Image (tube, grey):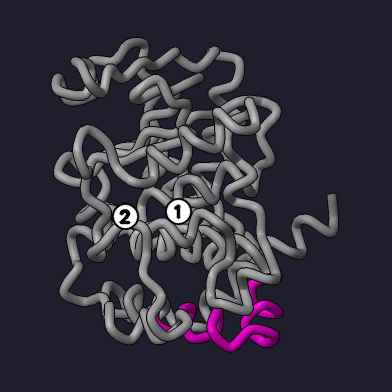
Amino acid sequence: MRSLVLSIVTFCLLAASADLRSDDYIRFPDDDSFLPASWVEEPIKAIIDPLDEKFEAASSDILKKALSKYPESLLKEFLDGIYVVGSLRFYDVGYGGTYMANAERIVLVYRPSFDARGFEQRFHHEFSSILLKKNEEAFEQIRWKKGNAPGYVYRAPGVIEEQSGDRSEATRVLAAEQKKTGGSGSGLLRLDADLMERGFLTQYNQVSIEQDLNETAAHLFTNPDLWSYCRDFPKIDHKVDVLIDFYRSLDESFDRYYFRSITDTDHAGTDSE
């Protein structure tokens, strides 16, 4: 009985420690003062709306789960904070999230209508960009491209997607999709088996190596179906291998078994709801 009590106490202490660690990163800004001054000016003209306080707890719970999937040392080294807002626009285009590599900050939009897994994926998507930009030498670009059809050229060159003119290619693609559909552009992130045959999970993966890695990372941390995609589509399996090796270069705990285990847990949680 005494050992059982000690185990329960230990578990509670660890859980409390994890919550404390998570709370250190999650922030709910009231204004745009956390953004770089250049982002608020033309031509970017960033506009945010604060998140309604009644939605803070729900968004925080999802982000705590996301943060728990990373070693504390990695978070301390590469993440300053996650700024959760009610809406976000750049260049008059609505965004679900973005990142500041130098400041190591992530900005995420949360709405109560959001799917929990989808919101968590936005975090992993943006954080993978910070990790890539800070550790580009550890990413095997040539090996990654072998997961594409011979001669395939991304819409934006290089590993890290840079701005061309006054905006990035991802912004152009998102703006065009929003104009065409009148919606948020989320259709760009819809999983597509035909694209998987060619090595891409979604349309958005085709924009750049960075966006390809971002969306693959989003599913690597959250989607139990990714392993069936790896089984059925060799090009997806190849990219997942390259991505896992990149994460493993940052922390040796990030092996395929680890990612299988955290997505199996997510799957079990989904089934029990």
Tell me if mark 2 has few (under 14), some (14-19) or many (20+) residues whose alpha carbon lies within 10 angstroms of its own: many
Query: Which residue shows up at 62% across the image and 82% down it?
Result: 230
- Quadrant of the image occupied by residue 244: bottom left
* Number of the front mark, 2 or 1: 2
Query: Which residue shows up at 51% across the image and 58% down it?
Result: 218
Query: Which residue shows up at 40% across the image and 86% down it?
Result: 146
Which residue, given by chain and number where applicable, does mark 1 sit on?
A: 124
Q: Is residue 45 left or right of residue 184?
A: left
Query: Which residue shows up at 41% across the image and 56% down it?
Result: 207
Q: Is residue 196 something one can see in this rendering?
A: yes
Q: Quadrant of the N terminus?
A: bottom right
Tell me if mark 1 has few (under 14), some (14-19) or many (20+) residues whose alpha carbon lies within 10 angstroms of its own: many
Q: Is residue 127 left or right of residue 177?
A: left
Looking at the picture, how far across and down is residue 169, in whole percent? 34, 46
User: For residue 139: magenta?
Assistant: no
Q: Nearer the viewer, residue 160 or 127?
A: 160
Looking at the picture, how far across and down is residue 120, in whole percent? 55, 47
Looking at the picture, how far across and down is residue 273, in whole percent? 84, 49
Looking at the picture, how far across and down is residue 37, in whole percent? 14, 19
User: For residue 233: magenta?
Assistant: yes
Q: Which mark is residue 199?
A: none
* Amino acid type shown at disc 1: His
Q: Main secondary structure of the magenta part?
A: helix
When the figure is inspected, residue 19 is found, relative to residue 10, above or below; the finding is: above
Find the magenta span and give its range.
226-242
Q: CA distance from mark 2 to mark 1?
A: 9 Å
- Quadrant of the image occupied by residue 85: top left
* Disc on the earlier residue, 2 or 1: 1
